[in-house]
Image (cartoon, helix red, strand yellow):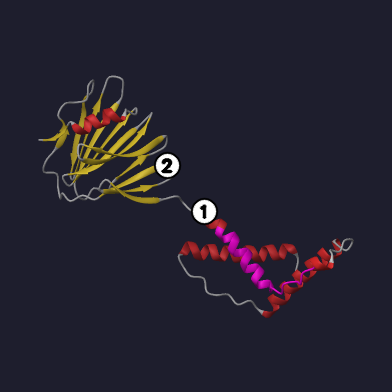
Amino acid sequence: MTVAVFNETLAMCIDADLSAERAGKELPEHVFSEAFERRMDEFFANRRKEREAASAAWEPPAAEKRKPRGIKAKYWLIAAAAVLLAFAAVACAVPEIRESVAGFFIRVFGDHFDYEPEISQEGIGRVYGFTEAPEGFFVDVSAREGNMIVTTYSDPSGAYIKLCQAARGFSGESVNREGCSLLEREVGGRSVTLLLGEEFSHAAWVEDGYYFSISCSPGFDESDIESWILSLGAD
C-alpha cells in the first residue's frame, strides 16, 4: 500500500465519521477485513524498512534500544482519525451560548445576540412610554401591532431612540453586537442588560410581565440610557 492510498483511506474514514456526526447518527463499529489488515501490515512494514535503511549508518547503544510495540495497523488508523476528528469538530463548531439573564435568554453568536424573553402578559393592557421625550428628540413614529408597540424618537441630526414594549407571543429580537460590550446593571430595581458601543447601544429588560428594549444610534452613554429607563411610566 502506498502513502497516497493510506491517506485516501484515512480521509474516507474521517468523512464518514463527520457525515454521521452532522446527521446526528451513531456510527456502527467498523470491522476491518483480513485483506485490509494484511495491506496495512505491509504498509507499515515497508515504512519500517525504509526508516531502518535510512538510519543504517548509525546504531544506538544497546541500552537505548527499545523493543518495537506490536500495535496493529487498524489501531494506528483509528487513533489518527480520532485526533483529526477532534480538531475538525473544534474548527467547524459555531460559537453559540445561551445565557439566562434579566428574565430572558440571550443566545450569543459571533456577530449578534438573539433575545428570547420570558413574558407573562397575554396582551398589552398598559402602555409604557417616556414621561418626557429625551432632550432634543421628538416622536417620529409610533406603531402598535398585536402584541408589540414600537415608538421611534428622532432629532434633527438623524439620531434615533427606539422604544419597544412586547407582550406574550413576541418572538424576540436580534441585535448586532459588533463593536459593543455587554453589561448587566440594576436600574431602579430592574435587571437590565446593556449593549454599549460607539455606533449603537441597546438595553433590554422584563418588567410587569412585559419585555422592553431601547435601541439608539449613535451609541449613547450608559448614564443617558439609565435615565431614559427611569423616566418610563405607564398610562
Q: Residue at x 13, y 38 (%)?
A: 127
Give the camera-side residue of 37 and 208.
208
What is the quadrant of the N terminus in the image? bottom right
Q: Which stretch is magenta?
A: 65-86
Outermost right residue = 57
Give the camera-side residue of 2 and 67.
67
Residue 56 at x, y = what percent? 88, 63
Q: Overall secondary structure of the magenta stretch?
A: helix
Total residue callouts: 2
Residues under numbered marks 1 and 2 in contact, where contact means CB atoms less than 8 Å apart: no
Residue 90 at x, y = what percent? 52, 54
193 w.r.t. 58: above or below: above
Residue 128 at x, y = what percent? 15, 36
Residue 175 at x, y = what percent? 34, 40
Residue 178 appears in the picture as rendered: yes
Q: Which residue is drawn at 39% across and 51% down?
A: 97
Q: Mark 1 points at which residue?
A: 92
- Crowding around mark 1 (Cα neighbors within 10 Å: few <14, some 14 to 19, many 20+) is few
190 w.r.t. 230: above or below: below
Q: Name the residue under label 2.
A: 111
